């Protein structure tokens, strides 16, 4: 029997106009109404997925390039994923929901209170994807921190949030109607937090979690997910996270090496490596036959100008720099990128090239458009059987914990990606067929 793996879904462009610009927009789902997301979440639960992580960004970016973000709804608008969560909980019973949260936007007290409330309402199915972007600081009247400084602040913030959650002692809740005693105020911790970034007093005014006091399997803090892959990001994961959302090339060696780094970071913080699931982002293109796969892969090596322009539009949004009006057959002048554009994103555009002088824009974009066959381990295009082989191989040979599929939260996308794959994974014993009763933490600890 193969190793059971965990599966999740990353709503990769946040809570916004899903399906816009795609033919499936014609299905008449209204992206402003909860039904679209509820229908998708129900399907994911029926498929045996453990959680949905909802991407978010707090800003539309640089004021000079707003149009790049929103003209094709590629980088906005983005509504608040925290407020979508209750609707998804209402539509499901077992699925965990982890909206993206940036400490920049919430004081620890406000965060601890809202998250405790969502953990109640969902019967322990709530999690947070903690990110540290500082580009949106100006919207909050805050000075931007540097990369590592933002992680330091996130650690102080999470520590403070957890202390608030635990400011109700284990036996604070009595809930004895016969004696009329609900809780014991002497068991609450009215602590004073005086840190580098935050100054406030406890205790929390909300009762942390269902199961508290009963010692039940239902008790437990919300799950922390982290996506940062830098050394500082992995150190954060080792100390704080239950799920590392990992972005890496998907092969046995890379997965082993990535897992080893996260496990070492966990041990360095006195934690058991099995306390963290490392789940790799995966966006396969599933086709109905090997011939179709060949056809798509061959065509991708020679993209037409329309395809390249679509790739340029996506890159322009991410880079906050308009590439769509540039001459495809000349190299890009690196001076067009403003200081605010991250070096990592620029390196991403360069891909295997060292320098912009080495390639025309057409060559850069062609490399981005190029697809490969999963059966050759050259990309992620394949039949459902081939994709399942790949997932199985990484579970068996790299001891992979699981995958996070990435896309919009639209029924058409989900059926296209999972319709054929789920039955195969289940037949092979890789994907769960039932859930336990332990909420999101339970989902992650079931195996
Ligand atoms: C798979 C993945 C998902 C991410 N999701 C978000 C997100 O939703 N919002 C956000 O602001 N940053 C997001 N990030 C960015 C990270 O939070 C982080 O800022 C970035 O990876 C830089 O940190 P690092 O240098 O430690 O990798 C994501 C990163 C990855 C790899």
Image: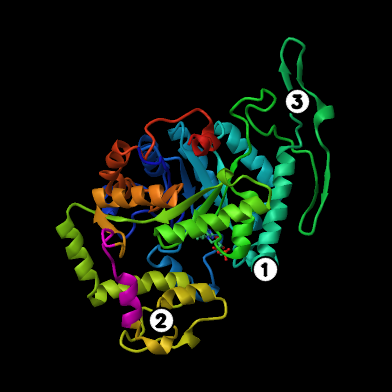
Q: Nearer the viewer, residue 127 or 287?
A: 287
| Of labels 2 and 1, the one closer to you | 2
Residue range (magenta):
362-376
Element on which disc 2 rests: loop
Which residue in the protein does label 1 denote?
144
Q: Residue 72, position in %: x, y?
A: 37, 65
**Which residue of the protein is positioned furthest toward the left in this rendering?**
291
Is 370 covered by the magenta stretch? yes
Badge 2 vs badge 3, beta-carbon distance below 8 Å = no
Query: Which callout, 2 or 3, points to the residue nearer the camera?
Result: 2
Question: Residue at horizontal 39%, vertical 59%?
Answer: 251
Q: Which residue is mark 2?
A: 353
The residue where tag 3 is placed is 171
Decide which of tag 1 and tag 3 comes sooner along the chain. 1
Residue at image coords 31%, 70% = 369
Percent position (x, y) of residue 306? 25, 74
Applied colour scheme? rainbow
Q: CA distance from mark 2 to mark 3?
A: 60 Å
* SS assignment at label 3: loop
Is residue 171 shown left or right of residue 87? right
Find the distance from the CA under tag 1 to the CA under tag 3: 41 Å
């Amino acid at each position: 029997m193969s190793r059971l793996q965990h599966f999740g879904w990353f709503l990769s462009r946040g809570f916004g106009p899903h399906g816009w610009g795609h033919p499936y927009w014609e299905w008449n789902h209204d992206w402003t109404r909860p039904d679209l997301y509820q229908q998708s979440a129900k399907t994911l639960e029926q498929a045996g997925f453990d959680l949905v992580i909802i991407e978010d960004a707090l800003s539309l970016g640089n004021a000079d390039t707003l149009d790049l973000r929103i003209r094709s709804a590629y980088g906005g608008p983005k509504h608040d994923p925290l407020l979508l969560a209750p609707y998804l909980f209402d539509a499901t019973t077992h699925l965990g929901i982890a909206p993206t949260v940036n400490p920049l936007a919430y004081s620890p007290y406000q965060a601890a209170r809202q998250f405790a409330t969502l953990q109640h309402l969902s019967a322990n199915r709530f999690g947070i994807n903690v990110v540290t972007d500082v580009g949106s600081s100006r919207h909050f009247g805050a000075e931007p921190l540097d990369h590592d400084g933002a992680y330091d602040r996130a650690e102080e913030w999470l520590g403070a949030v957890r202390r608030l959650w635990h400011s109700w002692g284990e036996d604070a809740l009595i809930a004895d109607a016969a004696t009329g005693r609900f809780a014991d105020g002497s068991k609450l911790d009215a602590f004073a937090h005086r840190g580098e970034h935050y100054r406030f007093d406890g205790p929390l005014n909300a009762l942390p979690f269902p199961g508290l006091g009963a010692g039940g399997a239902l008790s437990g803090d919300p799950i922390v997910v982290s996506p940062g892959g830098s050394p500082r990001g992995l150190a954060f994961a080792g100390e704080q996270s239950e799920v590392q959302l990992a972005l890496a090339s998907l092969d046995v060696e890379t997965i082993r090496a990535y897992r080893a780094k996260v496990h070492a970071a966990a041990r360095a913080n006195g934690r058991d490596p099995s306390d963290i699931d490392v789940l790799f982002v995966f966006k396969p293109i599933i086709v109905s036959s090997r011939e179709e796969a060949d056809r798509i892969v061959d065509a991708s090596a020679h993209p037409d100008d329309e395809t390249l322009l679509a790739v340029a539009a996506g890159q322009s949004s991410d880079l906050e720099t308009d590439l769509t009006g540039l001459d495809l057959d000349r190299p890009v002048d690196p001076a067009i990128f403003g200081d605010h554009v991250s070096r990592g994103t620029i390196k991403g555009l360069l891909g295997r090239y060292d320098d912009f002088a080495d390639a025309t824009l057409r060559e850069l974009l062609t490399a981005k458009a190029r697809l490969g066959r999963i059966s050759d381990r050259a990309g992620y295009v394949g039949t459902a059987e081939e994709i399942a082989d790949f997932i199985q191989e990484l579970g068996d040979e790299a001891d992979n914990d699981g995958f996070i599929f990435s896309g919009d939260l639209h029924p058409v996308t989900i059926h296209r990606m999972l319709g054929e794959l789920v039955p195969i994974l289940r037949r092979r014993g890789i994907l769960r067929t039932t859930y336990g009763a332990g909420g999101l933490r339970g989902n992650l600890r079931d195996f």
